[in-house]
Amino acid sequence: MSNQDATVNDISMAQVAESASFANAPVAMSLRNVSVAFNGRTAVRDVSFDVPQNAVTALIGPSGSGKTTLLRALNRLHDLTKGAVVTGDVKLGDIDVYGGTIPTTVLRSRIGMVFQRPNPFPTMSLYDNVVSGLRFNGVKKKSILDDACEQALTAAAIWDEVKDRLKAHGSTLSGGQQQRLCIARALAVEPEVLLMDEPTSALDPISTASIEELIGQIKNRVTIVIVTHNMQQAARVSDQTAFLLMAEDRAGVQIEVGPTSKIFNDPDDSRTLDYIRGRFG
Amino acid sequence: MSLNTSTVSSPSPVTNVEGRKRPSTSSRGAYEYVLLTASALFALIAAYFVGTVIWRAVPAFREQGFGFFSNAMWNSSFDPTVPSQFGSLSMIIGTLITSGIAILIAVIVGTGTALAITFLLPSRLRTIAATLIELLAAVPSVVYGVWGLIILTPWFQYTVGPWLAGIPGFDWLFGTTAGGQCYLLAGLVLGAMILPSYVAIGREVINSVSKELIEASLSLGATQWQTLWKTVIPTARIGLFGAGTLALGRAIGETVAMSMVLGSALSTNYQLLKPGATLAGWIATQWGEAQGSNQVPALFALGVILMVVSLSMSLISNRLVARQRRAATL
């Protein structure tokens, strides 16, 4: 444990220091008293924070703290689950996510998502995978799709590897390449926000490093909210960190939100410090 | 298939038991002996069955040659100077038409049903629906046959048939006269019969489509409908095709109901309101008068065709369903 202590602190000192000052950045999404309940049982309670634009916000916390549940509330993915109720305010810019003023399909094309395990559509070619979101949204013109495909794959740093075999299927790629393909697929619809749910948890260390590097590259075009169980990862990639913890009643609550450098070096709450130092979780 | 593997595998363990090469106790030897006897018996029965059917069919194939497949006549001659004519063309086409209609119904209605059960029903109703459908799949076909004959035939003869026959421009498909027992009715009854098993398998196939793919699709802004059409069905299509083949295998082998609602007629007029015959149904209806005559080898030959067709059907469907399992799990 003490060993891990040192590692975390080293990393946080070295890498977090450069965290951009985003205090003045525009707000991409804002959460106010957001709670999620399944069949009456609260899984996340009263979470409130702002997601700064073109920055990376990490959600950290031990298993069961509701990180993923909270993330999926942001693009209304809980709509699929019978008995799931999201309360409180979630806003994308000025738009009330749950207000009904914007169709869920449009909303989801503005808030993209990357999942734990790479999930390219197995029956589609690489090309079709990347442009699938645009096609869902009614884009048919080949020149637009071609451009978007190249752009998205370039942004996801995989264009050079796959440009000669866009007709191949996603399953021919390695796990890390597949995940970058999924990132490209999400970027192709040009979302304002990209939600990433432990995007490297199924990947090897080298692929993980490349995805983390990629996150740093794409944040200038998209706001990122990333769930991770890996504190070093949060320290390496994020500008802002939200720390969640499971309360007595097993609901996830927000303990502390702040600039990553502050959360990792000088948190306000002793529980945050304990978690960062690896005392539990 | 099982025939080959059991005959091949049976000799070697026997020598092992006799040779005491393995560190086996006497009780282990006894149980091996029992199992081997059982499986050898099975292999024997299977071999005897397949062997005799083929053996008894050989004279028909030899006498009729390729005509057995291209000829629509079925005349048993009692005059030694006039050769008998046995051709399975009518039955083959009848089987294809009725199975085709049935599979069309099963795939369209069944896929829709399976999707609805998986995505629309609340989980409690889902279990109930699945159980009911599996129960329906177990209903013996004779019940469907009686239902078709007593309930549907009159309806077809006096209502549906005349209406279809009266549609201008579709004479080529339906014909101009309405009968009760006909290809269309048989296809419908067969479709209703195979629908439950198609839905039961199709539901599992659709269930096996990873939730992550569905979420990926929705998270890109796809509607539920687009997700069904562009993600779920394409991912499940191999398995659905397998379910269809399995259902088709059952349809092709279906005997009792078909001999009841198709009218047991041999003709080269294949309009859908005309009566006809299927391979399996023809064997059943002809058997009574065939005994002792030279029809017997010809009926056995129909049996061989049926065996080959259903064997290949089940091989294909097994392969497809297995491939689906690998494809759908990420």
Image (spheres, helix red, strand yellow):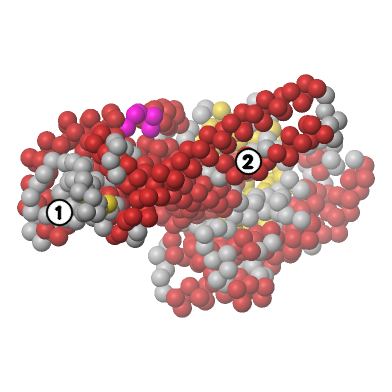
Left or right of residue B162: residue A182: right
Task: Tell me the kind of residue under disc 2.
Answer: Thr
Question: Is residue B232 visible to the viewer in this orientation of the structure?
Answer: no
Chain name for mark 2: B
Chain name for mark 1: B
Magenta stretch holds residue B57: no
The kind of secondary structure the magenta stretch mainly shows is loop
Q: Are marks 2 and 1 in contact (CB under 8 Å)?
A: no
Question: Is residue B92 visible to the viewer in this orientation of the structure?
Answer: yes
Quickly name the residue at label 2: B7
Seen at 70% across and 65% down, the residue is A214
**Residue range of the region highlighted in magenta in the rendering:** B137-141
Report the front residue among B55 and B137.
Answer: B55
Quickly name the residue at label 1: B174
Q: Determine the image quadrant of residue B141.
A: top left
Mark 2, Cα crowd under 10 Å, few <14 / some 14-19 / many 20+, is some
SS of the residue at dot 1? helix
Left or right of residue A215: residue B220: left
